[in-house]
Amino acid sequence: MMQIEDGKTYRSRNGNQVGPVRASQDGTYFFLGRSYTKDGHYHADRTVSPFDLVEIWAVEGPKDEPPPEHVMQFFEFSHLPPTLKEISRPFSQMAEDIVRKLPRNQQRTMALNKLLEAKDAAVRAFIAK
């Protein structure tokens, strides 16, 4: 059974954020004119209420950036000689646009892989004898 603590924030049965609650001298807890029992009930007789406190409010931290697309490393062109840089640059720019504009899913990954195939073919076409 949950026990309310002074200074903590809770989620009510109706989904609202409640708190931080404060302890009073009579053993109840209050927030914005509402009073709660030690175990989070809004009504002292413990009848169910949408205002009952049901769990600690989970504080979400900053969202972590998703890991980079593994395939993006193959669009790097700074190490290439000038002529191959010019061939590779538009493919790299297109890959960056795809990652920036499209949601991460299987189809985006497929688009990046196909673009990589096209870039590799263009480079091979240039260096073919």
Image: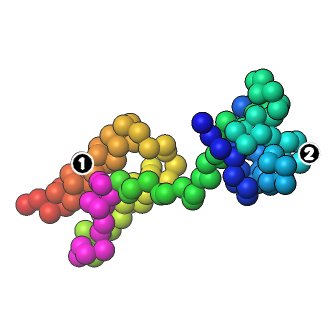
Kind of residue at disc 2: Gly
Residue 6 placement: quadrant: bottom right
Image-based side of 26 in relation to 116, left or right: right
* Precedes in sequence: disc 1 or disc 2: 2
User: Which stretch did the figure color magenta?
Assistant: 70-81
On the image, the x and y values in percent for residue 48 come to 76, 24
Residue 109 placement: quadrant: top left
- Which numbered tag is attached to residue 33? 2
- Which numbered tag is attached to residue 117? 1
On the image, the x and y values in percent for residue 21 come to 78, 51
Kindly report the distance in space between the C-alpha atoms of the residues bearing marks 1 and 2: 65 Å
The crowd level at tag 1 (other Cα within 10 Å; few <14, some 14-19, many 20+) is: few
28 relative to 25, above or below: above
- Residue 37 visible in the picture: yes
- Which numbered tag is attached to residue 95? none
- In front of the other: 67 or 4: 4
Tell me which residue sits at (47%, 57%) in the image: 65
The total of numbered circles placed on residues is 2
On the image, the x and y values in percent for residue 129 come to 7, 60
Tell me which residue sits at (24%, 73%) in the image: 80
Image-based side of 20 in relation to 1, left or right: right
- Residue 15 among magenta residues: no
- In front of the other: 42 or 44: 44
- In front of the other: 97 or 32: 32
